[in-house]
Image (cartoon, coloured by chain):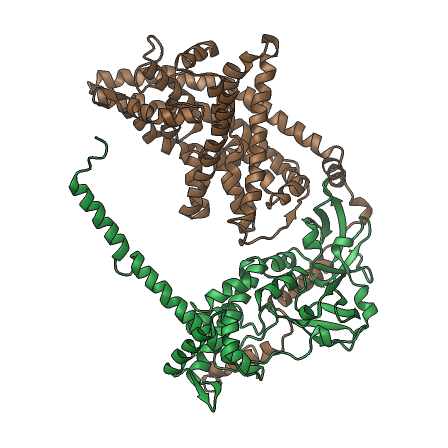
Chain colours: A green, B brown
Amino acid sequence: MLWAVPYEFSIGLGLLFMAILLWPRHGLAARWRQGQELARRMRREDALKHILKCEANGRVATLDSIAGVLQITTGAAARLLEELEAGALVTFESGRLRLRSAGRELGLHIVRAHRLWESYLAEQTGVAEGEWHHRAERQEHLLTPQEADTLAARLGHPTRDPHGDAIPKANGALEGEQGRTLNSVDPDTAVVITHIEDEPDTVYRQLMATGLRPGMRAFVIDKSPTRIRFWADGNEHVLAPVLAENVSIDLLPDFRTEELIEEEFLSGLQPGVPTRVIGLSPACRGPERRRLLDLGFVPGTRVEVEMVSPGGDPTAYRVRGTVVALRREQANLIRVSSRDVPDR
Amino acid sequence: MDPHRPSSSSERPTAEAILATAERWRQQLAGDVHEQVVEGLYRQAARVADRAVSRPDRAAMPTIDRRIDRLVTSRVWGFPIMLLLFGAMFWLTISGANVPSTLLASLLVDTVHPGLKGVFNSLGAPGWLTGLVVDGMYLATAWVVSVMLPPMAIFFPLLTLLEDFGYLPRIAFNLDRLFKQAGAHGKQAMTTMMGFGCNAAGVLAARIIDSPRERLLAILTNNFALCNGRWPTQFLIATVFVGTLAPAPLAGLVSSAAVTSVALLGVFMTLAVGWALSRTVLRGEVSTFSLELPPYRPPRVWQALYTSLIDRTLFVLWRAVVFALPAGAVIWLSANVHIGGESLATHCVRFLDPIGFLIGLNGVILFAYVIAIPANEIVIPTILMLTVMMTGSQGIGEGAGVLFKLDSNRAIGQLLTAGGWTVLTGVNLMLFSLLHNPCSTTLYTIYKETGSGKWTLVAAALPLALGFIVTFLVASLWRMM
């Protein structure tokens, strides 16, 4: 009689299930409620963040723009705004949506936490670049202002996040985004990329795939209504104008485009030809960057190819009397010049 | 005012003022502070070195080092040299360990064991105590020591000598391309090699990989390197079940080929599982790469011997012994505690039999893998003991729960065939011996190294699941044919 379970056993099992379901704080029901509460708070804070960003850039947040950014229906967005108004976070002045001081403070904290967390991921963890924004989107709601301050101190009070966005001070103001984009530049003008937009996700992923990073030097080769062909850090890129709109730049009046083209990278170095390190590419961040620096790839250092692996990759380089093997991807991050190479 | 002397208390600036000053200066700094510090350090170091160090002309430099490097990393000779060196190392280990292993076994198992038993009996100890302590705990530990110590004491010093000489990083350099495609670090070639000696040592060696993601990958896949504890199982089963399929003159060749294929399957699994892991659960983890290639040095023989014996051999052996003691007790108890007229082991084997049949093995093998978890070395003795118990063979072995060895392969073959073994059982045991959870020593080391119960669980469950799948497929195909 396999299934003749004693009834004490059934009662015990029943009690166990009830406990798993209803246990205070750790039961499944309590967990589900906590999850719902967190989701609601995240929506409120995301709405505040959006309104704050609109304010900083001189735009006006509307019901539709909030619904669009949060990907909820207009009805849900309206209810969300009601909630925010009831919480004294926003106000409607003559039909225009405005932040009250508590709302501005909270929104600023969210933006600050987001950008600090991205900096942390980029500089100290080495988590893959595609994960930064996504992870920060969640973490921004979990950090308290105190934790954000501690994090900022630990990172050495960074002023810009890895995408080039300004990190606001704890009680400061949010800086608006810079005006000029890659779209607006004339061909053959040297520029430096200052910011890569990280929202929406699809745009960011396409831009990330091109390998463009803040700090790279670039110039437009030619433009047409459907595409922009440009050069950046040793490679030619083509972007649709709608994507190039998301790349902010500053002009580099002291540089001629010929000088940019002449930039070389360690990966292109031939055996037997010594070269000199100019610096590390901005795309090289965090532990990777520190490791290369510690190994001696600092400006002015003489480097030459020592040997190449039988598979063609990695390549071993002689640098400051030691031999270090780097993969092609790493060698691609080191700017070199064949001019003024030191003797040793 | 002297800038080096602290100013008097009346002039001492407030904390806020200092912070404000620091903030102002920080705003003026362009770029990364860390970077500027490193550059400054190198500038300063180069200045000091230029003043203090005189270098001979460059002509003296391209020395033997460069010539060796050209040779061992050349397209033509790089891989043959590598295979030759490691073939030689394995041959030395396997053939060289035989003699001391037999000596140790005859001392610890054939001499000390009866002696201890005599001491216990003369003291009037009850039978169960003698059984538990001498037949169980002592004997299992003696087995582990006698089969584990000699190969490790040969393999690790050889490996340490190569390491000391500077050759191992060149292997990582040569093989990096391969490991890169699996999402792993070239240095994993070194930890895998260490794993051929002992997986616990291989896991420990993964410390040389400084990027967390690749290090975890090396730890999780190290078990696919066929360790010293499993080579004897492979050779025995290949000789008894696979070699006999071929005509007698070719038997040795065929069984060696079978063992080599299993080892190569392990290497393939290392790369395949690495590839799969780095595209799924380990995708977001940290990843960096750099590989230093130090100059060649004449190996310091005594130091190498000492460190390899103390740090690797004895360290791992100690952990194995710690786990072997309780396992010996469990093995003896399982065979000697009776419920309803039959021993615990019999119940367990009966229970596991249907699962075993499904994957072309049997309950005895599965139960042996459960209770012999401290070391792969005692799996075969446990299987033999359990088979004798289950078949009720007379005149073989030393009694219930007492591990023993048979000197002739023929006798082992006869015993196992009596236990219902076929060629399929042999082949699947070879596969399962490669693809199953790491021994408890390795698992404990993985836990220590990762500090995570989750990853330890993955390290145990992943190869076990693979083992079940592979043996199930092989058994199904075999039975269809």
Whether residue B474 can be seen here: yes
Q: Nearer the viewer, residue A220 or B345?
A: A220
- B428 is higher (above) or lower (below) than A130: above
Q: Residue at x 30, y 61 (%)?
A: A30
The quadrant where residue B157 appears: top right
| Residue A274 as seen in the image, left or right of residue B267 | right
Q: Nearer the viewer, residue B314 or B70?
A: B70
- B247 is higher (above) or lower (below) than B227: above
The quadrant where residue B284 appears: bottom right
The quadrant where residue A281 appears: bottom right
Quadrant containing the C terminus of chain A is: bottom right
Q: Position of residue A34 (x, y in %)?
A: 34, 64
| Residue A184 as seen in the image, left or right of residue B382 | right
Q: Residue at x 82, y 46 (%)?
A: B59
Q: Residue at x 53, y 53 (%)?
A: B285
- B141 is higher (above) or lower (below) than A4: above
Q: Position of residue A230 (x, y in %)?
A: 76, 67
Quadrant containing the N terminus of chain A is: top left
Q: Residue furthest bottom?
A: A94
| Residue B114 as seen in the image, left or right of residue A61 | left
Q: Position of residue A195 (x, y in %)?
A: 64, 71
Q: Nearer the viewer, residue B298 or B335?
A: B335
Q: Position of residue A321 (x, y in %)?
A: 71, 51
Whether residue B311 can be seen here: no
